Image: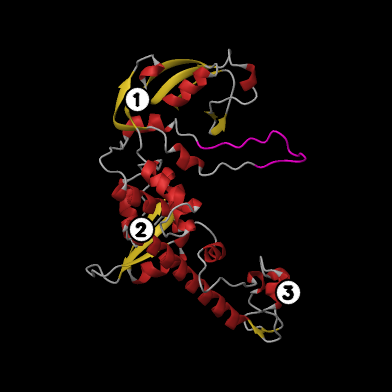
Amino acid sequence: MFIIKVLFENFKVKPFFRNNKVINLVYQFKENDKSKIYLFDSYLILPSSLRTLASKYKINDQKGYFPYTFVNESTLDYIGITPDIRLFNGISNEEYEGIISYTWNLRNELIRYLELDLKSLYQIITSFSQDIFNIEKIDITKLPTISSIAFKIFRTNYLGDSKLPIIKGNAHKEMRNAFYGGVVEVFKNEGRNLKLYDITSLYPFAMLNDMPTGDSLFSTDPNINNYFGIVFVEVDTTGLDPKYLNYPLLPHRIDGRMYNPLGVWTGWYLSEEIKLAISKGYSVKVIGGYKFDKTSNIFNSFINKFFNIKAGSSQIKMDRTTAKMILNSLFGRLGMKPNQDIIEIVDSTKALEILSKFNVKEQY
């Protein structure tokens, strides 16, 4: 907001928000000036620490270390012995020994640290953008997030003639109730000789399944086998196989939180989840739902290509980190809410006009 305030006082500024966060800024000198400057948040493009990215992309200028908490009004002109190692977050003893000095200058070190940050970020973004352009011929300079980049790649080079439905209105509201995230349950707080199992690329793997496409058709057909889509059902776990009692399959939201309950309830689900639940002993009554066409291989070429690059089994020359970012970012983009709050930064006169015409949720 500090940057926006300074720019707003001197330029024509248009910020773009999503979920109350600035995703990019566009500013120009005058109203009729055709020249525009775009500012992006690099973390929304490559959501990892600069140090981690610098290491993964093997760039020339690696991120340095700086004692943030050492800086205060009384130390701005400090020149002396290097501050204590405990003030340098994440530094090793060997790395610290390499920077020990009796003439450590805070101002010089701060400038050097910031310059390294800028050089590192520039080299990382350059490497990333060149990867994307060389393989997919996509210019990322006006794409503010990693999900928008992944979607642009898919829509341009992989979607083909397939038709992905855009759901709006009440249908979207109802279907979105079937959109559940992952859940982590802790059953025991401690243990011995524990083993860790990691599922590789679980969300991309799920995207290899058949997908609902075409226009939706609302139906009150009670036969679950006639659906491929989203259904509203009554669920009863009374006859559930005892081996599933401790780990129920179907999720359900109660007061905004997600549970996997036992009992009787109603909810929206993917038809294929309900078919699986029925095969495990759930009793389900279909009340209604939305039918779609079933289409195979919608995302397969996209997923397989980037997974193979990530796994090192492809001849395509792209950094593994780039491939992993693209591979994991498309799924979330397709679940983005279609309606977003409108956020504007205006002067007091315009603010009064907006307040008189619209229902404003928040103002600052």
Q: Which residue is mark 2?
A: 135
**Relative to 338, 281 lies left or right:** right
Instruction: Locate the N terminus by quadrant.
Output: bottom left
Question: Identity of the amino acid at label 3?
Answer: Asp
Looking at the image, which residue is at 44% across and 53% down? Answer: 314
Question: Identity of the amino acid at label 1?
Answer: Tyr
x and y percentages locating residue 99 in the rendered image: 67, 79
Secondary structure beneath disc 3? loop
- Taking depth in this image into account, of 298 and 166 the one nearest to the observer is 298
Coloring basis for residues = secondary structure
- Taking depth in this image into account, of 20 and 349 the one nearest to the observer is 20
Question: Identity of the amino acid at label 2?
Answer: Ile
Q: Residue furthest right?
A: 192
Disc on res. 290: 1
Alpha carbon separation for disc pair 3 and 2: 46 Å
Disc 3 residue crowd, few under 14, some 14–19, many 20+, Cα 10 Å: few
Looking at the image, which residue is at 55% across and 71% down? Answer: 62
Secondary structure beneath disc 2? helix
Looking at the image, which residue is at 59% across and 72% down? Answer: 64
Looking at the image, which residue is at 39% across and 30% down? Answer: 175
Is the magenta region chiefly helix, strand or loop? loop
Q: Residue furthest bottom?
A: 103
Query: Magenta residues?
Result: 181-196
Secondary structure beneath disc 1? strand
Alpha carbon separation for disc pair 2 and 1: 38 Å
Disc on res. 84: 3
Disc 2 residue crowd, few under 14, some 14–19, many 20+, Cα 10 Å: few
Question: Mark 2, mark 1: which one is toward the viewer?
Answer: 2
x and y percentages locating residue 225 in the rendered image: 39, 18
Instruction: Locate the C terminus by quadrant.
Output: bottom left
Alpha carbon separation for disc pair 3 and 1: 63 Å
Regarding residue 116, the answer to whether it shows in the image is yes
